Image: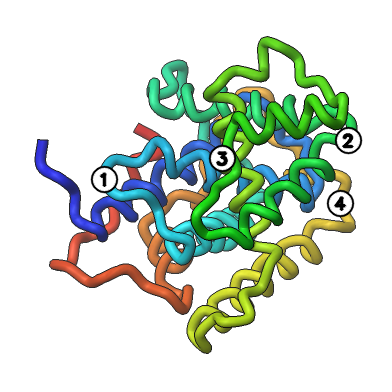
Amino acid sequence: MPVPSDQERLTQAEETLLLLIRTYLQRVSSKLSATEFVEMAKAAVALLDKDQSGPSLSFPESKRLLYIALQTFGTQLSQPIPALGEQIPKRIANLLARLVRYQKIMRTGGLEATLMTLAAQTLENTAQRLSPDMIRTALENSRITIAPELATQEGLEDLARALFFKLQLQTPSPTATKSAQEIAEQLNQAIAKFTTKYQPLTEVTQPQWDNDLSVSSPLFTPSNFETASNDFTWQPPKIADKSSKDETNS
């Protein structure tokens, strides 16, 4: 199988992320506050990296994906989203299960504060990354217990990956280039805009979708993909132009 180009890999990542979030909203919960939606999107981006073919997503690429998710859904969440159909692609179903497991783990009392401190220590040491073994040791020392069915090797790997990405977003680099600082500012503005827009509402999806989630929506049109993808400061390498294609409702 040929290795996809950087542009193809990122386009695939965008489509997968948007379909994953759309599936989450329809199959898991649409009753999210603005803050909960942002946190869910952050975790979805982090978990997507492991699922990618080819090289891992860089930090700028991951930030770009989060920006795209917030911009795309931020303009359309008040409208019904087209029905997904009976069959969810296996890849999306697997990502969805991992995302839900991560959220269940994060509901463990005292967990996030303990592990974010640990993650901060690893962020300072570029030769070390937050690992399942480190998480297990920290939990044993703090007497925090994750349910055995959630504390699998894959579950803890996903936890480590998501927490590290979350911390990276929160921690400005003192040596960041002017371009990196501009990218961080642009993403922070997108998060603030999304949160401000939906915070007065108890749920991000207003009005309520109908029972069949069948009303047509412009959410996944080529124009929306282009708008969300192209107004971020950092852009992937350019290759031969290809027309945008909406494959999320196939």
Looking at the image, residue 97 sits to the left or right of residue 205; the answer is: left
Q: Mark 2 sits on what residue? A: 110
Quarter of the image with the C terminus is top left
Tell me which residue sits at (59%, 74%) in the image. 184
Do the residues under discs 2 and 4 have CB atoms within 8 angstroms?
Answer: no
Camera-side residue of 172 and 144: 144
Circle 4 residue: 201
Kindly identify the residue that appears in the image at 54 percent across and 77 percent down. 183
- Residue 53 percent location from the top left of the image: 28, 40
Asked whether residue 52 appears in the rendered view, the answer is yes
Q: Secondary structure at mark 4?
A: loop
* Residue at (57, 62) in percent of width and height: 71
User: Mark 3 to mark 2: distance in Å?
Assistant: 27 Å
Q: Earlier in the sequence, mark 1 or mark 4?
A: 1
Residue at the spot 66% in from the left edge and 30% down from the top edge: 102
**Residue to which mark 3 is pinned:** 21
Residue receiving disc 1: 54
User: Which label sits in the foreground, 1 or 3?
Assistant: 1
